[in-house]
């Protein structure tokens, strides 16, 4: 018999929300036109894009004309790094690989990483001290919430001081969106559809009016010249519908996530003496638990057994799912290499039920005990 499937990997991606699915299907039919065409079919597609733009803007307390639709957060981050031009980029040591990757891809850029206090959020004063120590940076990048640990960074404390210094700030809000409200107005903010129950392959860059933005794709002038290419109307419509659903669902959804996560955390800590939570004392996303297993329980060695029991979670982040190297983010968060190799990330979301938590509480300790017996 197939095991019951329990999905606790929402930080990697979320299943589609019903509202997003409906919007995608409706747009595939009724929004098939080219959103740039002036006729009825184009106008119908354009109307769907306009509606979605307003919803994504509302999710992050921005105006619709600040939203540039992209293929996802990786593209949006890359465009910001590309737009910043040459020069030093000051970034937290736990940014998504998209930031480091974009810099590496652009060759000569100079990445200046600010260390994290162990198991804590970034210290805004340490970021500002680094900014002031050397030539003015071309960009500062600090994520709102970390995808691996769930630790929340006080990015709001950076906005005014960096603006006074004339240094642009990029905030990756991919993991915060849909789990906690977003009311920040940095120069650049990035979100993506698939982490909030929308489709994959669509995201958005929210740009403060006047912040420089250089297009990476130039052609038909879509997205007011910031990102050329015929809009994937169905993906954008699905993203908009998901943005609306999660905005309307907060804060009840966040409270539910916290309840489920806290029960999971308390149950696992009780069942696995020697286990501990990464960032236990830090402000964290309500849906995320990064648990360091007891000594001898290597997370990567449990993956197949957990999968065979139907439990989907993450050892490290999704990008490192098959790696046996400790995740850089965990080392940067202050874990030893040994601890990082014992870390499992469990993340709940809109489809998680109490029964899923019961199943995880039954399966995970059994698998750990079997592996360490
Ligand atoms: N930033 C963070 C914090 C993420 O968790 C992810 C997804 O893994 C990304 C950026 C990249 O997003 P996308 O898959 O839309 O390119």
Image (cartoon, rainbow, N blue to C red):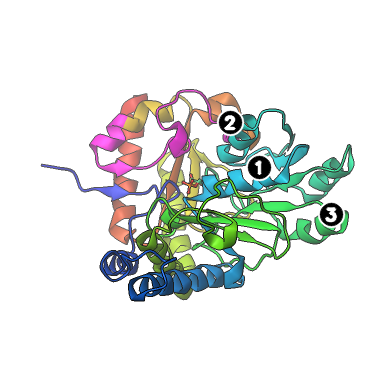
Q: Secondary structure at mark 1?
A: helix
Name which residue lies at 35% across and 39% down.
365
226 falls in the magenta region:
no
Which quadrant of the structure image shows residue 116?
top right
Name which residue lies at 54% across and 58% down.
221
Report whether 311 appears left or right of 211.
left
Q: Where is residue 340 shown, x and y percent of the image?
A: 54, 30
Q: Which residue is mark 2?
A: 328
In the rendered structure, which segment of residues is drawn in magenta? 304-330
Q: Where is residue 304 shown, x and y percent of the image?
A: 30, 30
User: Which label belongs to residue 42?
Assistant: none
Q: Secondary structure at mark 2?
A: helix
Direction left: furthest residue: 1
Q: Where is residue 274 shown, x and y percent of the image?
A: 50, 35
Q: Looking at the rendering, in which quadrant would you find the N terminus?
A: top left
Q: Which residue is mark 3?
A: 166
Mark 3 neighbour density, 10 Å: few (under 14) some (14–19) many (20 or more): few
Which quadrant of the structure image shows residue 308?
top left
Q: Secondary structure at mark 3?
A: loop
Report whether 122 appears left or right of 328.
right
Which mark is nearer the camera, 1 or 3? 1
Report whether 340 appears left or right of 132.
left
The answer to whether the residue bearing label 3 lies less than 8 angstroms from the nearest atom of ligand 1 is no
Going from N to C along the chain, the mark reached first, 2 or 3, is: 3
Going from N to C along the chain, the mark reached first, 1 or 3, is: 1
Q: Looking at the rendering, in which quadrant would you find the C terminus?
A: top left
User: Which label belongs to residue 82?
Assistant: 1
Give the distance between the C-alpha atoms of the residues marked 1 and 3, in whole angstroms: 18 Å
Give the distance between the C-alpha atoms of the residues marked 2 and 1, in whole angstroms: 24 Å
Q: Where is residue 353 shown, x and y percent of the image?
A: 32, 60
């Amino acid at each position: 018999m197939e095991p019951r499937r329990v999905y606790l990997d929402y930080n990697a991606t979320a299943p589609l929300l019903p509202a997003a699915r409906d919007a995608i299907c409706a747009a595939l039919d009724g929004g098939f036109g080219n959103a740039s065409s002036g006729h009825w079919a184009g106008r119908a597609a354009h109307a769907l894009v306009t509606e979605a733009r307003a919803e994504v803007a509302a999710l992050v307390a921005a105006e619709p004309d600040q939203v540039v639709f992209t293929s996802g957060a990786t593209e949006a981050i890359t465009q910001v790094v590309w737009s910043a031009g040459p020069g030093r980029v000051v970034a937290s040591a736990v940014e998504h690989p998209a930031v480091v990757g974009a810099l590496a891809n652009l060759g000569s850029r100079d990445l200046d990483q600010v260390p994290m206090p162990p198991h804590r959020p970034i210290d805004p004063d340490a970021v500002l001290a680094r900014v002031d120590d050397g030539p003015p940076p071309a960009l500062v990048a600090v994520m709102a919430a970390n995808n691996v640990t769930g630790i929340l960074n006080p990015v709001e404390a950076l906005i005014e001081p960096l603006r006074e210094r004339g240094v642009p700030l990029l905030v990756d809000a991919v993991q915060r969106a849909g789990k906690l409200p977003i009311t920040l107005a940095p120069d650049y903010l990035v979100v993506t559809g698939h982490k909030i129950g929308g489709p994959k392959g669509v995201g958005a860059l929210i740009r403060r009016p006047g912040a420089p933005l250089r297009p990476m794709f130039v052609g038909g002038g879509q997205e007011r010249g910031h990102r050329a290419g015929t809009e994937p109307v169905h993906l954008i419509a699905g993203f908009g519908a998901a943005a609306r659903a999660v905005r309307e669902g907060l804060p009840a959804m966040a409270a539910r996530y916290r309840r489920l996560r806290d029960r999971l955390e308390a149950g696992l800590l009780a069942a696995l003496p020697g286990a501990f939570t990464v960032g236990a004392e830090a402000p964290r996303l309500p849906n995320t638990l990064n648990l360091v297993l007891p000594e001898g329980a290597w997370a990567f060695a449990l993956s197949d057994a957990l999968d065979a029991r139907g439990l989907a979670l993450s050892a490290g982040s999704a990008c490192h799912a098959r790696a046996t190297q400790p995740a850089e983010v965990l080392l940067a968060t202050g874990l030893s290499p040994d601890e990082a190799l014992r870390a499992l990330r469990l993340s709940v979301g809109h489809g998680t039920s109490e029964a899923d938590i019961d199943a995880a509480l039954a399966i995970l300790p059994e698998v750990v005990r079997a592996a360490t017996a």
